[in-house]
C-alpha cells in the first residue's frame, strides 16, 4: 500500500459564496443543500483562485505604495485563509472508502468525493489499477488524504475506521443485458466485500451501487446478519441516479428551472421497478397521460439509453458518479448533525408488503431516521397500478438475493 498525500486545500473560494443564496425552500429538492452557508463549504472544491491576487490595480499606485498595500493585503489574506483553513480542517473529519475505485464509476466518484471538505481521508480500493488513480487524485488541493489499497490482502486496512463505504465494484451492463444478467458475477463480489465491511467497519454507512441493486442489497443484509452486525438503518441501495434523471427529464419537458425540481422515485432500481412519482413533483406541475407514460418509461430505461449509446463500453458512469457523490455528501452531512437531509434510497422497509423498497428517507447520525410515507399517499391511478405491477419482479429479485446469500458460507459467522 502506498500513501499518496495531498493535504492542502482550496481556500478563498468557499465560505463567502453561501451567503448569497436564495430563500429557504420547504421541500428537499437536492441531497446537496441549496440554501445555507454550509452548502458551499460542504460541496465546493473546484474554485481555485485565491483572493490574494484580486483587486490590486498597479496603474493607480506608485510601486512603494503597491508593495506596502500588497504586504498588508497579503498578510490579511493569509490570516483570513488561516482562519478558513482551521474552519475547514475541523469540518474535514470523515473517512470514506470506495471499493471498485479504479472503475468507470469509481474514478469520477473518487474525484467528486475528494472535493468534499467534510472528508479527511479517502481510501481507494480495487483489485487492480488503483495506485495511479490515487496518485493522480492526491494532487488536488482539497483537504482529504488519499490512500490506495490493492487486492484482498489490503482490503481490511482500506476499511478500518471508515465512516462511509461506497461499493461500485463489479461488472457493468453491455447492450442487450439486463441488470439481473450481472447477478452471477456481482453477487459474489458484493458478498465478499460486505464480509470485510462487517469485520472492519461494522458501524459504517454502506452504499451499494453494484447491480442488480434490487438483489445486492438483500445479499448484503443477509451477510451482515450472519456476521451479527446488521443495522438496517445503515445499509443503502443507491438509487439517487433515478431521482437525478427524473428531475432532469421533467425539468426539460416542462421548461422548469432544474435546481427547483424534485421528483421522488420509489420501488427498486431496474426497469419497471423504478417508479417515479410524477404526481408528487415539486414544484407542482400537471402532466397529460401521454407525458406521464413517456416520462416514466424514459426514466425507467435511462440506464439502457446510456448502455446503448456507449455501445459495449459500459453503462452510466459520470452521471452515476455525480449521483453517488450526492448521496455520500448527504450521508456526511447527516453524520455531521445536519437535521435536514432527505434522499430516496433502497432499504429494508415496511412501507409496502415487500421487505426492501426505495422511498424517501430522512437521514441522521444513525442512518435512516424516518421513512417519509407521505409520498406514497394519494398516488395517481397510473402510479397505483405501476406500484402493484412492479411488486412481483422486485419480490423475485429480493428473494433471489436472499437465496444466494443463504447458500454462501460466511467466514467467521
Ligand atoms: N446503482 C446505479 O444506479 C448504477 C448505475 C450504473 C452502474 N451501476 C453498477 O455499478 C457497477 C460498476 O460499474 P462501472 O461502470 O464502474 O464498472 P467498471 O467495470 O468500469 O468498474 C468496476 C470496477 O470494479 C473493480 N472490481 C471488480 N471486482 C472487484 C472486487 N472484488 N473488489 C474490488 N473491486 C473490484 C474492477 O477492477 C473495476 O475497476 C456495475 O455493477 C454497474 O452495473 C449501478
Image: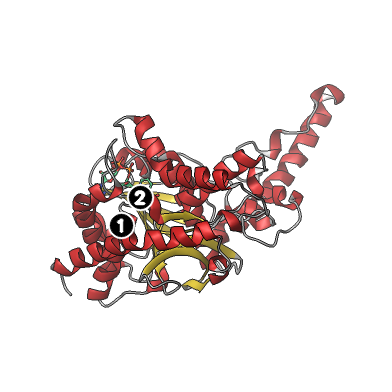
Q: Is residue 17 above or below residue 208?
A: above
Q: Position of residue 290 (x, y in %)?
A: 55, 43
Q: Residue at x 80, y 27 (%)?
A: 57
Left or right of 54? Residue 117 is left
Q: Residue at x 60, y 38 (%)?
A: 48
Q: Nearer the viewer, residue 105 or 345?
A: 345
Check disc 2 and report its element: helix, strand or loop. strand
Q: Is residue 120 above or below residue 102?
A: below
Q: Is residue 164 above or below residue 117?
A: below
Which residue carries the number 1 mark? 158
| Quarter of the rendering occupied by the C terminus | bottom left
Q: Position of residue 308 (x, y in %)?
A: 35, 33
Mark sitting on residue 147: 2
Check disc 1 and report its element: helix, strand or loop. helix
Q: Nearer the viewer, residue 136 or 223?
A: 223
Q: Is residue 93 visible?
A: no
Amino acid at each position: 500500500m502506498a500513501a499518496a498525500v495531498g493535504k492542502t486545500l482550496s481556500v478563498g473560494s468557499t465560505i463567502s459564496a453561501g451567503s448569497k443564496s436564495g430563500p429557504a425552500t420547504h421541500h428537499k429538492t437536492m441531497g446537496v443543500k441549496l440554501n445555507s452557508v454550509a452548502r458551499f463549504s460542504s460541496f465546493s472544491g473546484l474554485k481555485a483562485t485565491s483572493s490574494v491576487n484580486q483587486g490590486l490595480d498597479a496603474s493607480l499606485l506608485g510601486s512603494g505604495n503597491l508593495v506596502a498595500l500588497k504586504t498588508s493585503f497579503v498578510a490579511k489574506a493569509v490570516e483570513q485563509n488561516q482562519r478558513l483553513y482551521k474552519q475547514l480542517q475541523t469540518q474535514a473529519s470523515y473517512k470514506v472508502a470506495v471499493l471498485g475505485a479504479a472503475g468507470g464509476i469509481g474514478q469520477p466518484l473518487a474525484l467528486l468525493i475528494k472535493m468534499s471538505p467534510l472528508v479527511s481521508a479517502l481510501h481507494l480500493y480495487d483489485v487492480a489499477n488503483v495506485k495511479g488513480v490515487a496518485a493522480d487524485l492526491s494532487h488536488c488541493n482539497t483537504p482529504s488524504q488519499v490512500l490506495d489499497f490493492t487486492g484482498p490482502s489490503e482490503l481490511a486496512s482500506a476499511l478500518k475506521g471508515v465512516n462511509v463505504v461506497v461499493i461500485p465494484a463489479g461488472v457493468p451492463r453491455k447492450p442487450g443485458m439486463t441488470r439481473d444478467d450481472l447477478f452471477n458475477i456481482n453477487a459474489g463480489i458484493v458478498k465478499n466485500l460486505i464480509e470485510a465491511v462487517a469485520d472492519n467497519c461494522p458501524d459504517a454507512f454502506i452504499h451499494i451501487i453494484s447491480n442488480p441493486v434490487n438483489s445486492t442489497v438483500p445479499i448484503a443484509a443477509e451477510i451482515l446478519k450472519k456476521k451479527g452486525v446488521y443495522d438496517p438503518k445503515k445499509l443503502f441501495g443507491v438509487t439517487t441516479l433515478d431521482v437525478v434523471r427524473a428531475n432532469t427529464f421533467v425539468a426539460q419537458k416542462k421548461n422548469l428551472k432544474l435546481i427547483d425540481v424534485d421528483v421522488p422515485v420509489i420501488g427498486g432500481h431496474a426497469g419497471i421497478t423504478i417508479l417515479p412519482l410524477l404526481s408528487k413533483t415539486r414544484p407542482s406541475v400537471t402532466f397529460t397521460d401521454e407525458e406521464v407514460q413517456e416520462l416514466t418509461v424514459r426514466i425507467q430505461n435511462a440506464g439502457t439509453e446510456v448502455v446503448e449509446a456507449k455501445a459495449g463500453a459500459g453503462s452510466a458512469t459520470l452521471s452515476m458518479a455525480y449521483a453517488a457523490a450526492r448521496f455520500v455528501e448527504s450521508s456526511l452531512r447527516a453524520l455531521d448533525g445536519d437535521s435536514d437531509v432527505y434522499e430516496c434510497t433502497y432499504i429494508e422497509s415496511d412501507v409496502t408488503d415487500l421487505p426492501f423498497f426505495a422511498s424517501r428517507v430522512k437521514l441522521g447520525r444513525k442512518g435512516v431516521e424516518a421513512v417519509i410515507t407521505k409520498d406514497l399517499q394519494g398516488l395517481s391511478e397510473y402510479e397505483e397500478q405501476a406500484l402493484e405491477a412492479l411488486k412481483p419482479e422486485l419480490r423475485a429479485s429480493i428473494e433471489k438475493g436472499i437465496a444466494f446469500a443463504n447458500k454462501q458460507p460466511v467466514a467467521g459467522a
